[in-house]
Image (tube, grey):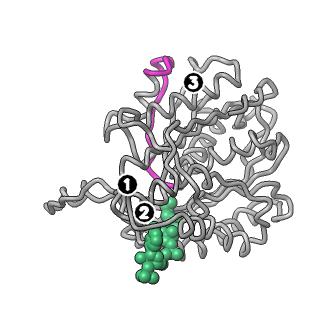
Amino acid sequence: MEQSKARITAIGSYVPDKRMTNFDLEKLVDTNDEWIMQRTGIRERRISEPDQYTSDLCVSAAQDLMRRYDKSLYDVDLILVATTTPDFIFPSVAAIVQDKLGISSSVGVIDLSAACSGFVYALHVAQGMVASGLHRKVLVFGADTMSKITDYTDRTTCILFGDGAGVVLVESETEETSFLAYHQGTDGIGGAHVYLNGIADKLNGVELSNTGNIVQNGREVFRWAVRNVPEGVKAILEKSSFTTNDVDWFIPHSANLRIIEPICERTGIPLERTLYSLENFGNTSAATIPLSLDLGIREGKLNDGDRILIYGFGAGLTHAGLLLNWNLHPQVQLPEAK
Ligand code: UT7
């Protein structure tokens, strides 16, 4: 029997309609457009409606995928949702998505919590599931509604985050794999540098008035990422037979352009061969990489046959990257212009 290979066959994405510009933020906190652009490269972000949750963003992203890849998702046999902003702690977003998309009840559903590294982790799990023959058709979401855990009185965090969702379909086939090499790392000692306050404090008996918000020591995360991501990129390339020259597109997590620039410098991949989604969407956590992939397609930059290196990093502290052979199913249509 031929061994299964895991291939990314289709993609979809969604961002909410509501925009929050740097000028809008000037009215909320002591900041300004010039500081935000200079320090982050972020111009605006999309913000979900009060009754619009991560599962809603996932469903809209999957509907976008279905418009472009005219195949039923009914027989998907595993749904993975990388998110740290689930609608509820339980039930999982993946279970809600199964219901809303009308996918067969024989599907498995898992939420996966690895913050901004989450989409890469979920793709890695999907690859393992499909290549091992345990699953045949896996939907992998990276989705977050960061605005719901953002403190809009904290100028050091509220300027960064936005909401969005992306999804890819990983299918079993015998001809070619999309997955060329993987690398991961964890520094749990840095957990306090970026976390969600509230629940752990409550478990420890500490009552906080300001709970359920992201708390971050931006400078520490910044330093850690600039050190660790280039090393991770090097490790992935060493595990494959490729060099930086063979990478058509580098897609690091869209945390901040001022982090991406030194990462590019240290890896030797020029910024011109880098895709990011932060300028118009901000830091959407687990969604930044699939949003950047889809933006690359929509802008006519990313094409089938390209070799791409995606790299997530964030809370944990965790980081993870994948070298991918980008070859969607030939039946996939280009997205309509937005
Ligand atoms: O995706 C999850 C992982 N998270 C990240 O990757 C975030 C990584 N870190 C960052 O993106 C950056 O550290 C930030 C954008 C968060 C901050 O940029 P920074 O260049 O590291 O600024 P800083 O924290 O060192 O602050 C510099 C100054 C401070 O003023 P003083 O103490 O020098 O007088 C801050 O109070 O800038 C001040 N400041 C602001 N000023 C205007 C901080 N936030 C703002 C603001 N507007 N929004």
Crowding at dot 3, Cα within 10 Å, few <14 / some 14-19 / many 20+, comes out as many
Q: Residue at x 69, y 37 (%)?
A: 6
> Magenta residues, as a range?
99-116
Q: Residue at x 41, y 72 (%)?
A: 217
Which residue is under mark 1?
A: 150
Q: Secondary structure at mark 1?
A: loop
| Residue 56 spot, x, y in % from top left | 45, 31
Q: Nearer the viewer, mark 3 or mark 1?
A: 1
Q: Nearer the viewer, residue 310 or 25?
A: 25
Quarter holding residue 137: top right
On whether residue 115 falls in the magenta region, the answer is yes
- Disc number for residue 157: 2
Would you say 175 lies left or right of 34 here?
Answer: right
Quadrant of the snapshot with the C terminus: top right
Q: CA distance from mark 3 to mark 1?
A: 33 Å
Beta carbon of the mark 2 residue lies under 8 A of ligand 1: yes
Would you say 269 lies left or right of 228 here?
Answer: right
Quadrant of the snapshot with the N terminus: top right
Tag 3 and tag 1, C-beta contact below 8 Å:
no
On whether residue 43 falls in the magenta region, the answer is no
Q: Please, what is the three-letter code of the amino acid marked with disc 1? A: Thr
| Residue 185 spot, x, y in % from top left | 55, 65
Q: Residue at x 70, y 37 (%)?
A: 8
Q: Please, what is the three-letter code of the amino acid marked with disc 3? A: Val
Q: Nearer the viewer, residue 90 or 335?
A: 335
Q: CA distance from mark 2 to mark 3?
A: 37 Å
Q: Nearer the viewer, residue 154 or 332?
A: 154
Is residue 143 at all visible to an observer of this figure? yes
